Image (cartoon, rainbow, N blue to C red):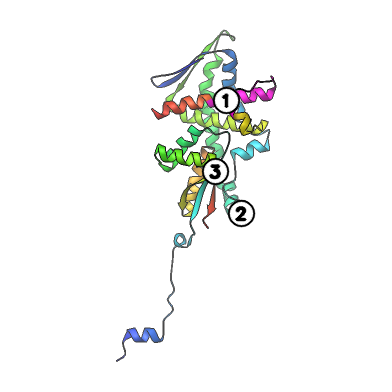
């Protein structure tokens, strides 16, 4: 895989089918319908539980806005990912071009996905920071790889936005 | 001689002070809490965007969050504090508003 800036795009070239599939899974991975923990993490409390008025108003007025914001980011990413669905040869390497105007949406959607996956598998700080851990090949290991791969993309996007 | 000054001292009038809701509002603080998933560089970028901090200052707060578990990013009136917390939640950071003791 090669990732580089090309004018108004960030180009992820030579994407092998496995990494392309992980990218295709970004929108789906932001789904919080399966787990309360993930939902609570994406829509965390704005204040201590004793601040009942603030928490109640937040649920009523702010959460729907946040939900719309997160959905919009995910939809933008899903639209960009359509590029990965047109390949005539499903096992060939492919290229994804992300317009720079969509980078904020990508950062947001990748973050949603990382938080939801981490909540789902209850990864702790040690696991998230241990880059020398030998995988056992479980679904949980794949989830950790996914979190780290999305984090790598976030780092690259942040680096580009800083320029 | 009976000046108005003396009279006001002898019979002090009780003035009713009117203050705006903001003046009566106690200061609130915006607190960001540690989260093992969010990248350090991402948190720094968010602090720069939301609070207009320099990179050095944003990194200082990010490290405080990472090492101490929390950092106070701003304090002031409730309405503005709520707006900041909303923005931080939009970036998926763990942030709360708290009354300043």
Q: Main secondary structure of the magenta part?
A: helix
Q: Relative to residue B30, is residue A8 depicted above or below?
A: above
**Disc 1 to disc 3, C-alpha distance:** 24 Å
Residue A49 is tagged as none
Closest to the observer: A71 or A6? A6
> In the rendered structure, are the residues bearing label 1 and label 2 in contact, judged by CB atoms less than 8 Å apart?
no
**Residue A116: quarter of image:** top right
Q: Give the residue at mark 1.
A: A148
Q: Which of marks 1 and 3 is in front?
A: 3
Was residue B55 drawn as part of the magenta stretch in this picture? Answer: no
Q: Give the residue at mark 3.
A: B68
In the image, residue A157 lies at what x, y percent?
Answer: 46, 26
In the image, residue A126 lies at what x, y percent?
Answer: 62, 31
Under tag 1, what secondary structure?
A: helix
The mark nearer the N terminus, 1 or 2, is 2
Q: What stretch is highlighted in magenta?
A: A129-151
**Residue A140: quarter of image:** top right
Residue A52 is tagged as 2
In the image, residue A96 lies at what x, y percent?
Answer: 50, 17
Q: Relative to residue A20, is residue B71 depicted above or below?
A: below
Pointer 2 indicates a residue of which chain?
Answer: A
Dot 1, how many residues are within 10 Å of its Cα: few (below 14), some (14-19), or many (20+)? some
Pointer 3 indicates a residue of which chain?
Answer: B
Tell me if I can see residue A15 in this picture: yes
Residue at x-position 29% and y-position 92%: B1
Residue at x-position 59% and y-position 33%: A115
Pointer 1 indicates a residue of which chain?
Answer: A
Q: Nearer the viewer, mark 1 or mark 2?
A: 1
Dot 2, how many residues are within 10 Å of its Cα: few (below 14), some (14-19), or many (20+)? few
Q: Do labels 2 and 3 share a chain?
A: no
């Amino acid at each position: 895989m090669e990732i580089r800036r090309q004018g108004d795009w960030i180009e992820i070239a030579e994407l092998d089918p496995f990494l392309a599939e992980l990218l295709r899974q970004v929108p789906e991975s932001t789904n919080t319908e399966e787990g309360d923990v993930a939902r609570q993490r994406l829509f965390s409390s704005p204040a201590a539980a004793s601040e009942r008025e603030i928490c109640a108003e937040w649920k009523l007025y702010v959460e729907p806005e946040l939900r719309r914001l997160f959905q919009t980011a995910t939809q933008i990413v899903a639209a960009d990912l359509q590029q990965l669905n047109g390949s005539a040869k499903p096992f060939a390497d492919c290229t994804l071009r992300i317009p720079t105007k969509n980078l904020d949406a990508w950062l947001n959607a990748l973050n949603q996905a990382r938080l939801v996956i981490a909540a789902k598998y209850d990864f702790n700080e040690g696991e998230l920071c241990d880059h020398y851990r030998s995988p056992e090949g479980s679904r949980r290991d794949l989830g950790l790889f996914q979190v780290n791969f999305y984090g790598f993309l976030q780092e690259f996007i942040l680096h580009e936005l800083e320029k | 001689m009976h000046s108005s000054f003396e009279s006001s001292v002898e019979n002090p009038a009780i003035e009713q002070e009117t203050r705006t809701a903001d003046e009566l509002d106690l200061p609130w603080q915006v607190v960001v809490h540690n989260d093992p998933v969010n990248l350090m560089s991402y948190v720094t970028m968010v602090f720069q965007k939301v609070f207009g901090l320099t990179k050095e200052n944003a990194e200082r707060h990010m490290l405080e969050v990472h090492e101490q578990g929390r950092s106070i990013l701003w304090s002031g009136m409730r309405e503005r504090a709520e707006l900041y917390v909303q923005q931080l939640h939009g970036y998926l950071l763990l942030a709360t508003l708290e009354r300043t003791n």
